[in-house]
Amino acid sequence: MTAAPRPSADTPTLPTSSPTYALPGTVSPLRSVTPAVWAALAVVYVVWGSTYLAIRVVVETMPPFLSATLRFIPAGLLLLALVAARSGPAALRVTPRQLGSAALVGLMLLLGGNGMVVLAERDVPSGLTALIIAVVPLWLVLARWVTGHRPAWTTAVGVLLGLVGLGVLSSSGLSGDVKPLGVALILLATLSWAGGSFLTKRLRMPANVFATSAYEMIAGGLGCLLVAVLKGEPQRFQPAEVSTASWIGLAFLVVFGSVVAFTAYAWLLQAAPLPLVATYAYVNPVVAVLLGWLILSEPLTLPVVLGGAIVVAAVVLVIRTEG
């Protein structure tokens, strides 16, 4: 097993101390979760919950993998510029091993994970996509168990309770024609995303977490570009045919979905317990369904309210165990 990334003077630090990592079978106090972790979780909860709707709008008039390329490469370059301006060019220096680790994780998260979601959302409603992606915490718990880090039984109960709540949410009758291939792609995306998240704590990553995010986004964007070229998307792309809504959605994904939220997620993977970070997959579907109600006038039914309450209870349980 490789060593964990070493913090440097350019690496953001928590205001007080690092989070207390819960050992299997133990319960760590809720106060060990610092305000910085709470703030980053809030960003990931809300912003990523809204990206499903944005992706759905973007792929209506833009090729899927090309849109992912136009999202991640500019976002990565922008973040590199911000890191260099804030901390100096030295913050961008990485060893070949660190760069390779960041590229691998970026490909798993953004090409394998997000790329397949973007492709699937041409046929699968955004709310249902978010519901399926909620299995990510289950894969993470299973990965911890397989590698000998069996989680506390309350964590497993919290994961299962969250899935029950999401099952109740899915019974609300989300509209749209759903193709089995689209569902299969999203399930594969969850495996790729969970694998990338799991490896983040086990590979030697760049010391500066923001530089890490930038390298991951550029690597993922280049992977999406390669797939787009192989699919012939650039040749079919007509900018004049892209709707204004799609351009606005793409801008939102670049700035908020990638630079802001993905950076917060990458920092959480290094600064907070993995099961706690994974709770975003429970909250995002609730946000996605609520946005569908607010923006698309989808009915807010009893299953939505009940399922949302169960999801919140599951998040609280996991936080009390692993926070």
Image (cartoon, grey):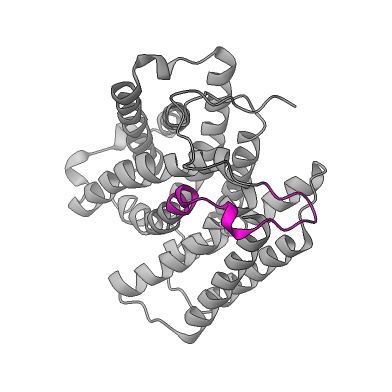
Disc tally is 0
Location of residue 319 with respect to 219 vertically, above or below: below
39 on left or right of 170 = left
* x then y, percent, for residue 137: 63, 55
* x then y, percent, for residue 229: 40, 29
Determine if residue 159 is in view.
yes
Closest to the observer, 111 or 302: 302
Q: State yes or no: residue 85 in magenta.
A: no
Q: Residue at x 50, y 16 (%)?
A: 94
* x then y, percent, for residue 47: 38, 54
Residue at the farthest bottom position: 302
Location of residue 196 with respect to 40 vertically, above or below: above
Q: State yes or no: residue 26 in magenta.
A: yes
* x then y, percent, for residue 192: 60, 42
292 on left or right of 93 = left
Location of residue 161 with respect to 39 vertically, above or below: below
Q: Which residues are magenta?
A: 21-41
Which image quadrant: the C terminus? bottom right
Closest to the observer, 309 or 190: 309
